[in-house]
Amino acid sequence: MTDDRSRVFPDALQDIETAREIPVTPQTQSPAYRLAFADDAFLLRDELRPVRLQLELMKPELLMQEYGIKSTIVLFGSARIPEPGQEHTAGTETLAELTRYYAEAREFARLMTLKSKKNGNRENVIVTGGGPGIMEAGNRGAADAGGVSIGLNIVLPHEQRPNGWVTPELCFNFHYFGIRKMHFLMRANAVAMFPGGFGTLDELFEALTLIQTKRMCPVPILLFGRAFWENIINWQALAEAGTIAHEDLELFRYVETAQEAVEIIGTWPGKAA
């Protein structure tokens, strides 16, 4: 962050460089002598978790502010769905059939990014989890349109490497799932849900819960593939059981195509296309 005010105290980076020139003595070589903010071992202590949580919230926030990102279109979906033509790599027949949603996710991101470019790639910027599958399709579609996109990666045993279509300056890595999910929704103007597994379901119900409980302003939640979603979630049974209200079923809409999703976002009350 740029600060044009004259500095009263020494710059932190300057102090790190100065500390490197201090003569070697038993005292200066002790871990206790290291500057706290330059001491990885200290910052990684369990007791410093609150500080790490704050840093993980602030770093993407500050960098996105500096880039000028004002609002986003969130794109969620399975990392396991391959692109069309790669059906042979799918683990199941169903996954092979779902490759059409890779194409729809890519086209949806392309169409939304074309609109985003009209305001300088600052509003309705595509954001994904930054990984493979549907996430890759989203970032790739934004690149097809010549725009920018955000990737919010997380360190996992698998799938943690960012795909090659994320804008490098907007590619972030997380340790904490909770902070990552905050960044997904903090600027969201719409949420596009493609077929997925546990992670996608977690992200879907997080958004629905926040809107249902009025902890988040209503935004379009678009479920791509009615047959898929109705097969895995019996929404009507929840309403009939009384565990959700019947009007809660209006919090989301089913869509089948990218164009249909773009039209719904464009006509959603209070939301700019």
Image (cartoon, rainbow, N blue to C red):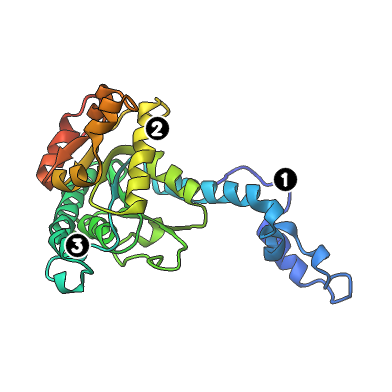
On the image, the x and y values in percent for residue 92 come to: 20, 66
Residue located beneath label 3 in the image? 95
- Is 116 left or right of 187, judged from the image as shown? left
Between the C-alphas of marks 3 and 1, the distance is: 60 Å
Dot 1: within a 10 Å radius of its alpha carbon, few (fewer than 14), some, or many (20 or more) residues? few
Q: Is residue 132 above or below residue 138?
A: below
Quadrant of residue 85 within the rendered picture? bottom left
Q: Secondary structure at mark 3?
A: helix
On the image, the x and y values in percent for residue 239 come to: 27, 27
Residue located beneath label 1 in the image? 8
Q: Amino acid at mark 2?
A: Leu
**Residue located at (15% from left, 34% from top):** 264
Mark 2 vs mark 3, foreground winner is 3
> Which mark is on residue 210?
2
Q: Is residue 1 visible?
A: no
On the image, the x and y values in percent for residue 93 come to: 15, 65
**Residue located at (70% from left, 58% from top):** 45
Q: Secondary structure at mark 1?
A: loop
Dot 3: within a 10 Å radius of its alpha carbon, few (fewer than 14), some, or many (20 or more) residues? some
